[in-house]
Image (cartoon, helix red, strand yellow):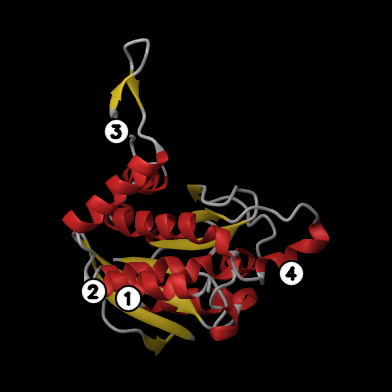
């Protein structure tokens, strides 16, 4: 059994903020993979389901970011899990927007949600670091992470969430490399060659052709109602 934790702050006021990207990640997994409805448990919201062959618990602590570890520790002890069974999705200032890295162990780098989690379960858990970029100056960080994503971020954020959903089963089954590949395919999909250039090489599609290809893909592979609903909610935050 795995425990996937999304870090964030509860309430509509914080729903679209950069600090809540961890909540967004587990929300898309919950809706895309037919997990049970959220219920109040362990000072947070929990949902149960399966990713591939692995049973997974999703947890969104509602203790506010700085006390996240209380909820994580309570859930881990109840299910008799080890820190190695826990994977935490969180915002990462030190990565460019849309960049993702997976690591196990190490310090908390000043992230208050990780600091709290370290205090309750130690450091030997897995983290999925979701890049949000840095505002440039330390004194701007607090306002930056608690501010909603900009409308210009909507496209890459949508692709990132889809990639996380695509690779979630691989992450649960202990294959972070395959998870990262799934995210990369959404963030930078392979370009189809559409013609021959002057030197005989293949040319990449023009922007208009990419749009047409994307439209065709949507028609050939329609999204499920649940996915449309989840992604629509995400898109609504930028209006």
Residue 43 can be seen in this image: yes
Asked whether disc 4 touches disc 3, contact meaning CB atoms under 8 Å apart, the reply is no
For the residues marked 1 and 4, what is the alpha-carbon distance in whole angstroms?
A: 29 Å
Secondary structure of the residue carrying tag 4 is: helix
Q: Which label sits on residue 229?
A: 1
Residue 127 can be seen in this image: no
Asked whether disc 1 touches disc 4, contact meaning CB atoms under 8 Å apart, the reply is no
Q: In the picture shown, does residue 41 fall above or below 8?
A: below
Residue at horizontal 33 percent and vertical 41 percent from the top:
209
- Occupied quadrant, residue 178: top left
Q: Which label sits on residue 192?
A: 3
| Mark 4 lies on residue | 143
Q: Which circle's residue, 1 or 4, is located before the other in the chain?
A: 4
For the residues marked 2 and 1, what is the alpha-carbon distance in whole angstroms?
A: 6 Å
Q: Which circle's residue, 2 or 4, is located before the other in the chain?
A: 4
Furthest toward the bottom, the residue is 40
Residue at horizontal 37 percent and vertical 13 percent from the top:
198
Q: Residue 44 at what x, y percent from top left?
A: 47, 84
Q: In the picture shown, does residue 87 fall above or below 202?
A: below
Q: Which circle's residue, 3 or 1, is located before the other in the chain?
A: 3
For the residues marked 4 and 3, what is the alpha-carbon distance in whole angstroms?
A: 41 Å
Query: Dot 2 surroundings within 10 Å: few (below 14), some, or many (20 or more)?
Result: few
Query: Dot 3 surroundings within 10 Å: few (below 14), some, or many (20 or more)?
Result: few
Asked whether disc 2 touches disc 1, contact meaning CB atoms under 8 Å apart, the reply is yes
| Mark 2 lies on residue | 225
Q: Residue 231 at what x, y percent from top left?
A: 37, 69
Closer to the observer: label 3 or label 2? 3
For the residues marked 3 and 2, what is the alpha-carbon distance in whole angstroms?
A: 29 Å
Q: Residue 55 at what x, y percent from top left?
A: 24, 67
Query: Dot 1 surroundings within 10 Å: few (below 14), some, or many (20 or more)?
Result: some
Observer-nearest residue: 203 or 82? Answer: 203
């Amino acid at each position: 059994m795995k425990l996937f934790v999304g870090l964030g702050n509860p309430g509509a006021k914080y729903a679209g903020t950069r600090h809540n990207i961890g909540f967004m990640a587990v929300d898309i997994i919950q809706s895309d993979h037919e997990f049970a409805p959220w219920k109040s448990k362990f000072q947070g919201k929990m949902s149960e389901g399966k990713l591939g062959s692995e049973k997974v618990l999703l947890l969104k602590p509602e203790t506010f970011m700085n006390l996240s570890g209380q909820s994580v520790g309570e859930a881990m002890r109840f299910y008799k899990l080890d820190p190695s069974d826990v994977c935490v999705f969180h915002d990462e200032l030190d990565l460019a927007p849309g960049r993702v890295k997976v690591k196990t162990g190490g310090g908390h780098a000043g992230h208050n949600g990780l600091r709290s989690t370290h205090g309750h379960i130690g450091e030997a858990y897995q983290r999925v670091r979701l890049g949000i970029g840095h505002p440039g100056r330390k004194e701007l960080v607090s306002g930056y992470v608690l501010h909603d994503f900009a409308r210009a971020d909507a496209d890459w954020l949508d692709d990132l969430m889809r990639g996380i959903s695509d690779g979630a089963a691989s992450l649960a089954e202990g294959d972070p490399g395959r998870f990262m590949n799934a995210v990369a395919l959404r963030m930078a999909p392979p370009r189809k060659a559409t013609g021959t250039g002057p030197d005989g090489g293949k040319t990449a599609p023009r922007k208009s052709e990419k749009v047409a290809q994307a439209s065709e893909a949507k028609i050939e592979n329609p999204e499920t109602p649940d996915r449309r609903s989840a992604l629509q909610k995400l898109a609504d935050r930028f209006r």
